[in-house]
Amino acid sequence: MSSLNFIGGEKGGVGKSVTSRLLAQYFIDHSRPFVGFDTDRSHNSFTRFYEGFASPIVVDSFEGLDKVVNGFEHNPAQSVIVDMAAQTLAPLSRWIGESDLFTVFKELGVNVNFWHVMDDGRDSSDLLGKLVDTFGDRAHYIVVQNYGRGSDFAMMLGSQSLAKATALGAQVISLPRLQEASMRKIDAHNSSFWKAVNDKEGPDALGLLERQRVKSWLATAYASFDTLPL
């Protein structure tokens, strides 16, 4: 099985790039072939942290977005991760509609997953409804409650947006919070999560308990990913 994963949320600062990095590390640790694409020209954090696996693309260009899917024709076993910048749903939906992407990938047997990464604000919930209204029952939705960006998701859990999504088979997962100091150190040194866990002696190495917290955080996230059509 392979999958095309659009990691979005339409809103800045909800943890889309962290989720993309987690999924990349999950594929690496499970020896699953994948390629990554980074649409955020403001910081390209996915490309920085997983250089060699991810490359930047221009989301408002059909030629740029075509690069996301071209590899499936010659390597249908690989998966793809696309770290979507904020406010990119409109150009993405135009490209998908005019390219008849869902038909192409149904024929190839590739799952198309739209990840909606959320904080606990109402706008994240409303934007989930917009995503579902855009693609309807043609896509699979993965709703990510990011506890690194919020602590009370009751509003989302009781929302009409989530009801619409789950009626179409959406899956809801939780992304646990990693202690802020550890995440700051990882980000400051452009470290992969593998390096954060395994580097014990380098100048950027985390301490023993920091490494253990990252390891536990990854294990919890991976357990959620195991339930998804990846």
Image (cartoon, grey):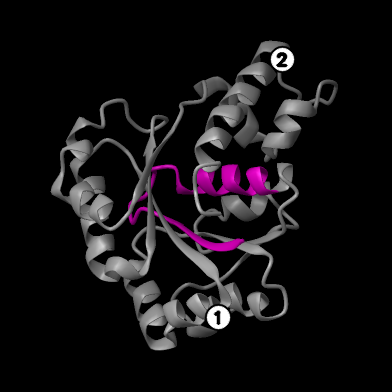
Q: What element carries label 1?
A: helix
Residue assigned mark 2: 207
**For this rendering, which residue is in front, 211 or 204?**
211
Q: In which quarter of the image is the C terminus?
A: bottom right
- Tell me if mark 2 has few (under 14), some (14-19) or many (20+) residues whose alpha carbon lies within 10 angstroms of its own: some
Residue at position x 46%, y 48% in the image: 16
Q: Which amino acid does label 1 sit on?
A: Asp
Residue 66: mark in rendering: 1
Q: Is residue 57 above or below residue 142?
A: below
Residue at position x 60%, y 22% in the image: 216
Q: Does residue 5 belong to the magenta stretch? A: yes
Outermost residue to the top: 209
Residue at position x 72%, y 54% in the image: 51
**For this rendering, which residue is in front, 196 or 106?**
106
Counting the numbered discs, the total is 2
**For this rendering, which residue is in front, 61 or 103?**
103
* 160 relative to 4 in the view: left or right: left
Q: Does residue 61 belong to the magenta stretch? A: no
Residue 152: x percent and y percent? 26, 27
Residue 165: x percent and y percent? 26, 54
Give, as a single range, the part of the protein colored magenta.
1-27
Q: In this view, does 51 lie above or below 226?
A: below
* 220 relative to 160 in the view: left or right: right
Q: What element carries label 2?
A: loop
- Tell me if mark 1 has few (under 14), some (14-19) or many (20+) residues whose alpha carbon lies within 10 angstroms of its own: some
Nearer-N-terminus badge (1/2): 1
Residue 25: x percent and y percent? 66, 43
**Residue 204 seen in the figure:** no
* 203 relative to 152 in the view: left or right: right
**Residue 193 seen in the figure:** yes
Mark-to-mark CA distance, 1 and 2: 43 Å
Of discs 1 and 2, which sits in the foreground? Answer: 1
